[in-house]
């Protein structure tokens, strides 16, 4: 029989099994799965290949020739279907965890079935395969050996006492045997004494009565004609010279002494065993505590290493509580503010080192900004925060047309909007109307947001000549076939309007209107549905913190861009 064949207990040959780790006849299984990369980029589509009990992934199907980006051997992997997300499966090997999402629950079941099939065919994952490879026998043997050893060890003290009782029984038996032998020896001694007495009487008789020796030399005839056995001559050191009774008493005493000594030794052994048992119990308790500490530390380490994983991000079953969520968002926003502050300081340093342009310029935008007012109303729908917001703001030196132009034109978007990761114009409807898709930078643990909206700018005609010059930018969410929602981002819904009025104060004398005579009054109205499952307290805190900063950042940018340039009414 070859090495890769096995026999059952009855001696019949079982089915042929391939060598461990080399499945035969299993087709390669591959497809697109979303893989969790990190808390910055979230879920990303990857080409995943299942082959030879190994799961590998590539950035795309076209890049397979450049080699995989990672792989997992499934021999000792743990595959877990997510409890709440019907499309997600987690594959872990020791501390390495892959979070994967299929297109739908059916595809997830296909992947799980294929993985289990590869594991089973390679000799892992089933009890029958363990039995085929002898692991079940080894496990049973090891368990039986340990159980027997442990039972013997724990019952050793009890067994020693049993042995002592057995020795006491043997002692009684031995004593009875010695008594029997003593009686036998006493009987023998009495018989010999009687024979010697009778012989002495025969010797002391008359010579005529002395029996004659027969030719056979075995018997003597007395005068009465009777026949008696001739006793051999015994020396004084014969049977009568041995004190059988004394010897028996000595034998008893010796045996009793041996048993007493053995009993004492056994008592010492039992006491020593009790001492060692106590030490063993202490060591086992110490080991148990160390193992518990190790498991606890390992769990904490896994929790920290996976703290940026999908189970700790925003979601209906997130493992992070509201306070931790709030603290994480605050910390991320503080880091962004610090980066933005450093960037602004660098820009200011460059501006100070460059020559100041001639003409009207407002280098310090704060000098020309008036107090802001922000109004909010708390509104929730199905647990989602929909707080409408209205903010009023006034800035000197710019017109309403200029403010709306820089707010609407996507060419300047990245210059003042620091929360956007990327954006693109999906469709241009007219010179003043476009459909824009943009994704915002993720603030972990909140999910990344994207928004698809139509942005339009127009001038509002005045009813009479005394009304101020008014411009309007309106952004509201729409749907488009070229920008469908994805699993990577949560699609937010917006309805935003920026209304800018230009107020002009007449110049003194015959002077021309300059930027000193211009004041722009801004009214910003926003109604945002962020979607997702972020806590209401976090959303309100972020809105309270970010909206004033947004207005400050944007108006400062507009002042810098328009300084020294002709006025655009």
Image (tube, rainbow, N blue to C red):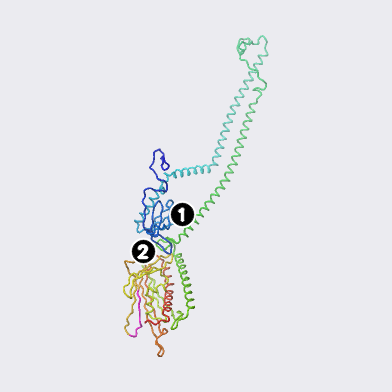
Regarding mark 1 in the picture, which secondary structure is present there? Answer: loop
Q: Quadrant of the N terminus?
A: top left
Residue receiving disc 1: 94
Residue 319 picture quarter: bottom left
Kindly report the secondary structure that dominates the magenta region of the rendered protein.
strand
Residue 88 picture quarter: bottom left
Question: Which mark is drawn over residue 261?
Answer: none
Compared across the picture, whether 338 is left or right of 524 comes to: right
Compared across the picture, whether 30 is left or right of 244 comes to: left
Disc 2 from disc 1: Cα separation: 31 Å
The crowd level at tag 1 (other Cα within 10 Å; few <14, some 14-19, many 20+) is: few
Mark 2 vs 1: CB contact within 8 A: no
Regarding mark 2 in the picture, which secondary structure is present there? Answer: loop
Q: Quadrant of the C terminus?
A: bottom left
Residue 411 picture quarter: bottom left
Question: Which mark is drawn over residue 486?
Answer: 2
Report x, y in % for residue 346.
48, 74
Q: Which residues are magenta?
A: 465-474
Residue 451 in magenta? no
The crowd level at tag 2 (other Cα within 10 Å; few <14, some 14-19, many 20+) is: few
Report x, y in % for residue 213.
63, 11
């Amino acid at each position: 029989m070859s090495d890769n064949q096995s026999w059952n207990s009855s001696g019949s040959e079982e089915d042929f099994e391939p060598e461990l780790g080399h499945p035969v006849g299993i087709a390669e299984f591959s497809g697109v799965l979303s893989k969790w990369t990190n808390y910055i980029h979230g879920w990303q589509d990857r080409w995943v290949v299942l082959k030879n009990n190994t799961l590998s992934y590539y950035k795309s199907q076209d890049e397979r020739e450049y080699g995989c980006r990672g792989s997992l051997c499934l021999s000792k992997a743990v595959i877990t279907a997510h409890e709440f997300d019907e499309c997600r499966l987690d594959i872990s090997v020791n501390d390495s965890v892959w979070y994967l999402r299929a297109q739908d629950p059916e595809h997830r079941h296909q992947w799980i079935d294929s993985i289990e099939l590869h594991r089973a065919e390679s000799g892992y994952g089933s009890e029958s395969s363990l039995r085929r490879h002898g692991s079940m026998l080894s496990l049973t043997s090891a368990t039986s050996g340990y159980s027997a050893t442990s039972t013997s060890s724990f019952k050793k003290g009890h067994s020693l006492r049993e042995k002592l009782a057995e020795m006491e029984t043997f002692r009684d038996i031995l004593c009875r045997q010695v008594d029997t032998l003593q009686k036998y020896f006493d009987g023998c001694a009495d018989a010999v004494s009687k024979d010697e007495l009778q012989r002495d009487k025969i010797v002391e008789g008359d010579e005529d009565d002395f029996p004659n020796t027969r030719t056979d030399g075995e018997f003597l005839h007395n005068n009465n004609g009777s026949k008696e056995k001739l006793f051999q001559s015994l020396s004084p050191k014969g049977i009568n010279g041995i004190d059988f009774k004394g010897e028996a008493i000595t034998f008893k005493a010796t045996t009793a002494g041996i048993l007493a000594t053995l009993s004492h030794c056994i008592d010492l052994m039992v006491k020593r065993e009790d001492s060692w048992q106590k030490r063993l119990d202490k060591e086992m308790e110490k080991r148990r505590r160390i193992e518990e500490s190790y498991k606890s530390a390992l769990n904490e380490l896994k929790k920290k290493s996976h703290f940026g994983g999908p189970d700790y991000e925003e979601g209906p079953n997130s493992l992070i509580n509201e306070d931790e969520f709030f603290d994480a968002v605050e910390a991320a926003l503080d880091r962004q503010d610090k980066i933005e502050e450093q960037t602004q300081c660098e820009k200011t340093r460059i501006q100070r080192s460059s020559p100041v342009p001639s003409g009207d310029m407002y280098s310090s935008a704060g000098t020309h900004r008036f107090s802001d007012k922000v109004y909010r109303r708390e509104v929730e729908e199905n647990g989602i925060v929909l707080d409408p917001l209205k903010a009023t703001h006034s800035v000197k030196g710019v017109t309403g047309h200029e403010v709306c132009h820089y707010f609407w034109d996507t060419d300047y978007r990245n210059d003042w909007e620091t929360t956007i990761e990327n954006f693109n114009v999906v469709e241009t409807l007219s010179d003043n109307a476009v459909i824009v898709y943009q994704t915002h930078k993720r603030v972990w643990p909140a999910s990344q947001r994207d928004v698809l909206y139509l942005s339009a700018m127009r001038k509002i005609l005045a009813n009479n000549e005394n009304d101020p010059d008014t411009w309007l930018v309106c952004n509201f969410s729409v749907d488009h076939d070229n920008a469908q929602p994805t699993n990577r981002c949560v699609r937010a819904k917006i309805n935003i309007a920026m209304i800018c009025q230009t107020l002009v104060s007449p110049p003194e004398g015959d002077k021309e209107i300059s930027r000193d005579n211009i004041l722009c009054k801004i009214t910003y109205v926003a109604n945002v549905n962020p979607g997702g499952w972020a806590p209401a307290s976090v959303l309100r805190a972020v809105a309270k913190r970010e909206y004033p900063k947004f207005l400050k950042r944007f108006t400062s940018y507009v002042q810098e861009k328009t300084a020294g340039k002709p006025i655009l009414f």
